[in-house]
Amino acid sequence: MSGDKSDRDYIGFATLPDQVHRKSVKKGFDFTLMVVGESGLGKSTLINSLFLEDLYKSRIIPEVDAKIQRTTTIEKKTMEIEEKGVKLRLTIIDTPGFGDAVNCEDSWKVCTNYIDEQFKQYFTDESGLNRRNIQDNRVHCCLYFVPPWGHSLRQMDLELMKRLHRKVNLVVVIAKADTLTATEIVKLKQNILNDIRENAIQV
């Protein structure tokens, strides 16, 4: 009798975490990574190495004259990666032209506008009636590449980071660090951390 009561009292919510996990694994996960930095800092190489895919087969680094006239644009690449039965829909948001022009004051606007647009679109989709097949295009993480030839963060770097750090997970990468000595790397990293703290930037 007690066994029957136990069966009747069992609702099943204890297995909900496992059910949600199985459902998520079957559906797959969305991950959007924004990559920001000047041309020639090794962004493409790092991304290819991270995901073991050649995402930039036809990438051409522009000449100096062409860089000066460039404006920041958005390029989007999406692919599916599967590992141990788990599917990942990976989207890379590249920002060619960032920091290349003579006047870089507003380079950050294209990045922040894109991130805001994706938040608005996701909110609109979540507020709709059909929420089963929503594509999550929100930017989950931003890799920001800092050139190795400076002594600290530039004004352009700070302007972008101030506007992004509350919108997206921000990861600062010292580009081409292998061109620096161990002492130079430590000093540059410390200067960057000091700039980040002084400007109340969350990373």
Image: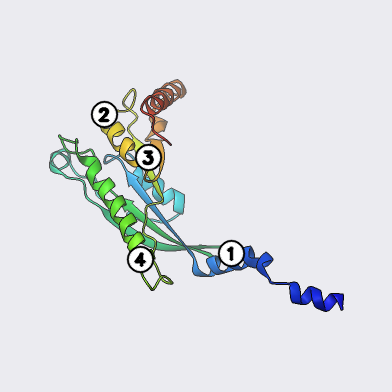
Which residue matches tag 1? 21
Task: Tell me the crowding category of disc 2: few under 14, some 14 to 19, or many 20 or more residues within 10 angstroms, Cα based.
Answer: few
The tag on residue 155 is: 2
Which residue matches tag 3? 165
Which residue matches tag 4? 125
Separation of residues labelled 3 and 4 (CA atoms): 24 Å
Foreground: 50 or 25? Answer: 25
Q: Nearer the viewer, mark 4 or mark 2?
A: 4
Type of amino acid under label 1: His
Separation of residues labelled 1 and 3 (CA atoms): 29 Å
Q: Quadrant of residue 36?
A: top left
Mark 3 or mark 4: name the one nearer the start of the chain. Answer: 4
User: Circle 3 — which element?
Assistant: loop
Type of amino acid under label 2: Gln
Q: Position of residue 70 (x, y in %)?
A: 16, 44
The reply to whether discs 1 and 4 touch (Cβ–Cβ < 8 Å) is no
Q: Position of residue 191 (x, y in %)?
A: 39, 23
Q: Is residue 23 among what the camera can see?
A: yes
Mark 4 or mark 2: name the one nearer the start of the chain. Answer: 4
Separation of residues labelled 2 and 1 (CA atoms): 44 Å
Q: Position of residue 178 (x, y in %)?
A: 42, 32
